[in-house]
Image (cartoon, helix red, strand yellow):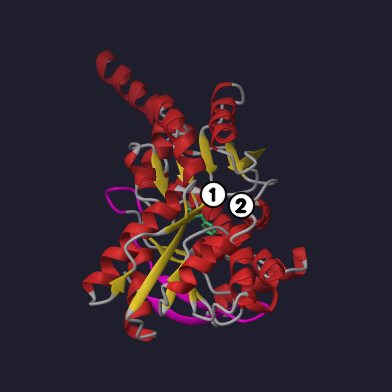
Amino acid sequence: MKVTIQLVLALLISVLSFSVQAKIKEVKVGAVFPLTGPIATYGQESVNGMKLALKQLELDPKTKGLISLLVEDNKGDPIDSANAVRKLIDVDKVRVVLGSVASSNTLAGAPIAQKAKVPLLTPASTAEAVTLTGKFVSRICFTDNFQGEVMAKFARETLKAKTALVIIDNSSDYSKGLEKVFKRVFKKLGGQVVDQSFAYQQKDTDFRTLLKRAKRRRPDVIFLPGYYTEAGLILRQAKQMGLNVPFLGGDGWDSPKLFELAGKAAAGNYISSHFAPDDTDPMVQNFVKDYKSTYDSRPGAMAALGYDAILVLADAIARSKTDTPKALSRAINTTKDFTGVTGNITLDKNRNAVKSAVVLRTTEKSFVFKSKVNP
Ligand code: PHE
């Protein structure tokens, strides 16, 4: 009899402590984003999007105070990214890291999170290698194998291009990864690719020699998987020298700054991305409205991904049994059918999101929805 009472008591205590644990109060989250430097709009938009999502969480008593966010500026630099991840984990003891954007930045920080067994969730880094780092590294975006294929198909099937030339950013893992996929798929679809790619480095500003050589090859399209700072200047300089073929890019062009840098030359090109602000979906339109009224600008892909990243994380915390990094990692990695403004988010067994991409057309001033491509 005595034993039974003790057993019942023990059981009761464990049930009680479990239900106490199940209510996670506050999770300290570190964020590593480029707030300054050559890709600063990515970080600024991400933080705007994340803050909008946090504001939303604050309105619900169930999620009020659930996430406390600590933001570090990595300046768009791999070494700063690694240092920021290390500091957030070792000094601030965060339980989750969000970030970063440029794949080369995320690849520098991810091994540190993996080794410390702290989940790192990137909203935006698309290079294949990112999630190969290990089980603690995951993403809510598609990968470059998908994005590169979307643009190669678009070039061949929609634009009917027969020949393509590729210009890459040699300092970016993202750019080099997209180059490979684009070339492979474009050739597979019967297109011809100018063998040798033309390359530049991040922070270059004069592309005229490179563009002169590219012009001589007379391609039907030019694939330019770079970031907006260089892409904007390349578009402008290409137009100045009469190189009038459509340029195709990836999500790296997705910044309001592209239009400032390219001027009129921004128009008539195409990119693949994660989000179309002119999508008529009511949820997207609500987000666009909120964002505009808060920040007085139109949200781009990074704003939308930052917003979704926080809400995906809040959803994972709600499903997590405890607030240990390990349990949180497991909850993040089992995200399924989450409806975000960037689409339906389900992580596969390799911790990549399987979701649709959009093709956007550029005008002189903005990106316009062209089509949606499902995986
Ligand atoms: N996908 C890019 C990379 O991996 C980053 C990016 C995402 C840039 C979304 C703009 C918008 O480097």
What residue do we see at 54% from left, 74% from top?
Answer: 276
Magenta highlight range = 348-373
Q: Secondary structure at mark 1?
A: loop
Instruction: Give the quarter of the figure containing the N terminus.
Output: top left
346 and 195: which is toward the camera: 195
Residue to which mark 1 is pinned: 201
Q: Residue furthest top?
A: 2
**Residue at the spot of label 2:** 204
Residue 17 % position (x, y): 44, 28
Question: What amino acid type is highlighted by mark number 1?
Answer: Gln
Q: Is residue 367 found inside the magenta-colored segment of the image?
A: yes
Q: Amino acid at mark 2?
A: Asp
Q: Is residue 62 magenta?
A: no
Relative height, residue 262 to residue 7 (above, below): below
Picture residue at 23% right of the left edge, 77% below the top: 190
Q: Position of residue 368 (x, y in %)?
A: 57, 81
Mark 2 CB near ligand 1 (8 Å cut) = no
The reply to whether callout 2 and callout 1 are in contact (CB within 8 Å) is yes
Q: Position of residue 369 (x, y in %)?
A: 52, 81
Any part of residue 342 in sight: no
Say left or right for 268 vs 45.
left
Number of other residues with Cα within 10 Å of mark 1, as a class: few under 14, some 14 to 19, many 20 or more? few
Picture residue at 33% right of the left edge, 26% below the top: 11
Mark 2: few/some/many CA within 10 Å (<14, 14-19, 20+): few
Q: Nearer the viewer, residue 127 or 373?
A: 127
Image side of residue 148 versus residue 93, left or right: left
Q: Residue at x 43, y 25 (%)?
A: 116
Residue 109: horizontal and vertical position, in percent?
Answer: 49, 34
Mark 1 CB near ligand 1 (8 Å cut):
no
Mark 2 to mark 1: distance in Å? Answer: 6 Å
